[in-house]
Image: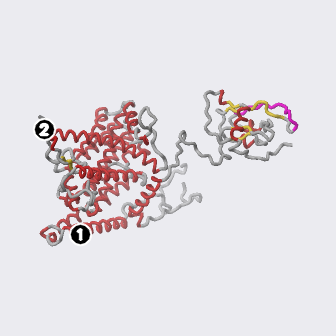
Amino acid sequence: MREDDPDIKWVEEPQLGLAGRMYLPLLVGGLTTTFKYLLRPKVTVSYPDEEPRIDAHEIYRGVHRLNRDERGRVKCVACFLCATACPAHCIDIIGVESPWEDREKYPESFTIDELRCIYCGMCEEACPVDAIELTSLYNLTGRSREEMIFDKEKLLSVYDATKETERMKSTEPERTP
Amino acid sequence: MIDQSLVLAGIKIVALVGGIMTSAAYFVLLERRVAAWVQDRHGPNRVGIPLTKIRLFGLGQPLADGLKMIFKEEYTPAHVDRRLFWLAPIVIMAAALAIFAVIPFGSSLPPIPRLGIDEPIPLVVAPMVDVGLLYVFALSSVAVYGVKLGGWASNSKYSFLGGLRSSAQMIAYELPLGLGILGIVLTSSSLGLNDIMDRQSSTGVWFILSQPLGFMVFLIAAFAEAARLPFDLPECEQELIGGYHTEYAGMELLLFLTAEFIHMITASFLITIMFLGGWHLWGLTGAPDAALTWPLALLRIAVFNAKIFGVIMFFMLVRWTWPRFRFDQLMTLAWKVMLPLGILNLVTVAVLREVLHPSHLGSSMSQGGQLMLECTVGWSVAIGAWALVAWIGPTVSDNHPRLDVRSMEVDPQI
């Protein structure tokens, strides 16, 4: 280390005033702060007894859901962008030719291994039609590994369960031409 | 036929040891809860009555903690000096508990003629000890031996450093601790704790009012003696992993921790007895020679315990208010600040005693006037001395890197 290194910023410690040197005024100030915090409402959430409040569910990254369009069909167009973006390789899609005229493909099967997922939200970012979204359901549990592999119906049912409380993050999906 | 006083002493010992141990356990819980509250948390609030779902604000926690400690493996490392390793917790615990033989925990209970007790029952295990303070100080020095033995016998660097720090700190702060109370001993002309309380209750002036400087010195030294923050260098968990009890586990560790808490309780007892008037509260607890009735005796015990509780709460709040001192600051505070302040307090009190002696001014002044003079002089000396110390500022030490002081040539590789 060189003292005249321009990257080093030298600061002078402020001089203690009389109150600081007498200790007692600062001690009283510190004790007042401590005492104030003693009586403040606690921030801890006693989880099983009370549920945490999630205010911004738009940015919360919980269980996935597959959105439905206005006709109740799955919105996904089986473009594989989410599966490609997924760093944990937990999305498995089988795309087949779509029976509908507005898109070429749709997912015949769409499974997410919720145990392998790291809840990074990249699938949500990658999706061009806003079909896959992360909800604010946080207490995801299961009794077996198989139970934790969510298929298309399960993911759609998550949408059905959460569509009232959590609106779709983009209501006007851009359709690929 | 067993002597009645022996039976009474036995009952008092049982009540006291039981009470102290139980309250130490619950003060641990309180400490954890207070720590949590200060940090906006809840703290341990879930253990209640075992096998039920009743939580009782976590009041079952001490039981669970104790069970955990008892059932833990009593692991003794191979490299320790076994005899001393076993002796250390016993010494520290025995000394901590034995102190309470002379510490009163109330004034006295009224006589119970139905049981053949015709005298008031003093609420202290050994009532007739005239040198109570000497006994307390002797035993608190013995307690330091437990710390040193633990640090030495553990044969580990952390423990050894903790033991070293602890010896230096205890020796340094025993001087101001003694000096802080010398003024009181002079004023009440007794080393007995009951006499000191009686003096305060008969004059109605607590010693914190007439000797604030002595109180400050004693309070700070008591914090250091109890090794509480901001003076917990013997066992600072971040640097020394617990210091002298690093190598201990299970019940031995529990003995150490409990003894430390008992030290804090002892310090609160001493502060309350010597500076905060003991069981005395103006207009509520009556004169010391008032006829004892059961309500009055119980009221005095309640007042006494409330004061002790307040002091312990103060200990706990200070823990979360002040950061730990550096070791050189600790020593500077002891030798350059507390020692002179303590001597000054002693000299002030001695001069006042001399001036107010009946052969000098004492005969011409009323007792109220004397007390007023004592308080005025005490406070002005305290404020003046404190401000002078702040102005000279011996504790303001500066060791941060500075640009104008060239450091030694540094290896360019670094």
Q: Nearer the viewer, residue B205 or B74?
A: B205
- Residue B50 at x, y = what percent? 42, 33
Badge 2 sits on which subunit?
A: B
In the rendered image, the vertical position of residue B57 relative to residue B368, given as above or below: above
Residue B62 in which image quadrant: top left
Q: Identify the disc placed on residue B373.
A: 1
Tell me which amino acid carries mark 1: Leu
- Residue A73 at x, y = what percent? 79, 36
Q: Which residues are magenta?
A: A90-101
Tell me which amino acid carries mark 2: Asp
Q: How many marks?
A: 2
Left or right, B166 with respect to B7, comes to right
> Disc 2 marks which residue?
B3
Q: Is A98 one of the magenta-colored residues?
A: yes
- Residue A40 at x, y = what percent? 48, 53
Image quadrant occupied by the N terminus of chain A? bottom right
Residue at 24%, 61% in the rendered image: B204
